[in-house]
Image (cartoon, rainbow, N blue to C red):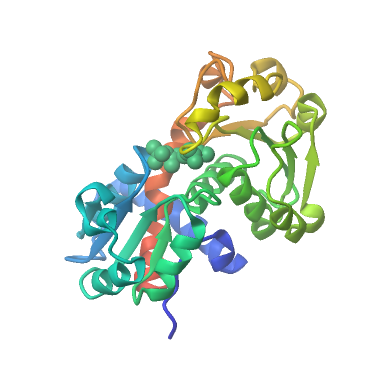
Amino acid sequence: MATRHFLTLLDLTQDELHYLIQRAITIKSNLKAQGPNYTPLPNRTLAMIFEKSSTRTRVSFETAMAQFGGHALFLSPRDTQLGRGEPIGDTARVLAEMVDAVMIRTFSHAGLEEYAAASQVPVINALTDDYHPCQLLADVMTWIELRGRVQDRTAVWIGDGNNMCHSWINAARQFGFKLRVCCPKGYEPRADIVAAAGDQVSILHDPQQAVTDADLVTTDVWASMGQEEEQTKREADFAGFQVTEALLDLTKEDALFLHCLPAHRGEEISTTLLDDPRAVVWQEAGNRLHAQKALIEFLLLGKIS
Ligand code: CP
Ligand code: NVA
């Protein structure tokens, strides 16, 4: 059977994604009740290639493997041969001889696809310039945990049409909710990704209009990793797109606010927004651990009945 990879949310079927969310909720509740006594992957290893910085992704994958009875290896281009020009495909073939799965955080999504095409073991996208699907597993899990279902509900993305936005668009397709993307002109998500979502996704430019009667609001930094030199220009271009408590007041009574973190208080969010009870970002961050455990388990062991 062909090796399964998780490069975008479209690599799994809708049924598989729903299974993963429910499995993550079960894994979480068992961990809370019994401690880390579920060790389905003894002596298995996950290679983690990080070409960009990370706190949550590294800690959640490393903890997931440790609690599962396995081990994770942190690999950086600074101290591996990847940084000295060893071809991606050669690295993929070598690692597949030794480890059970590979997680990659990198710049180019095409580079990730090239790696996966050469890999005999599952490859997980831990963020590229174009997508961040692991974050969406945790985000949808959090929404479902707190509100029961997401189908036919309305989420609003405020800000840059970036990697997180693209994965929210794919999540709208796969989980059946509506997504309003609200961005400054010139910062729209990729047209092909939007078009593929059909009428699940709309593009707006007025935050007040976008959030009215929404079930969930989410945002992200204005300048992503690799765009640091655009920070000043982006601060000017995104003025008026800050998510504040007053903006959330236009949503439905029980609306939630998510942010993948790290957050820049005073830029994309008001300085106090994360203290608002509608902001559930710490639970969201913690769910990275449980959602990725469900993903690793699925890729290595299949569905657990
Ligand atoms: N949200 C997220 O991926 O965080 P890190 O960059 O800290 O991994
Ligand atoms: N859009 C952000 C997400 C960080 C988790 C970035 O790519 O830097």
Q: Residue furthest bottom?
A: 1
Above/below status of 13 relative to 133: below
The image quadrant that residue 179 belongs to is top right
Closer to the camera in the image, 277 or 187 = 187
180 left or right, relative to 77: right
Above/below status of 197 relative to 202: below
Closer to the camera in the image, 241 or 79 = 79
Which residue is at 68% across, 50% downward? 190
Which residue is at 55% across, 27% downward? 279
Residue 271 visible, this angle: yes
- Indicate the quadrant containing the N terminus: top left, top right, bottom left or bottom right: bottom left
Q: Residue furthest left?
A: 43
Which residue is at 40% across, 54% downward? 292
**Residue 133 coordinates in the image, percent (x, y):** 51, 53
Q: Residue furthest front?
A: 85
Residue 100 visible, this angle: no
- Indicate the quadrant containing the C terminus: top left, top right, bottom left or bottom right: bottom left
**Residue 39 coordinates in the image, percent (x, y):** 23, 61
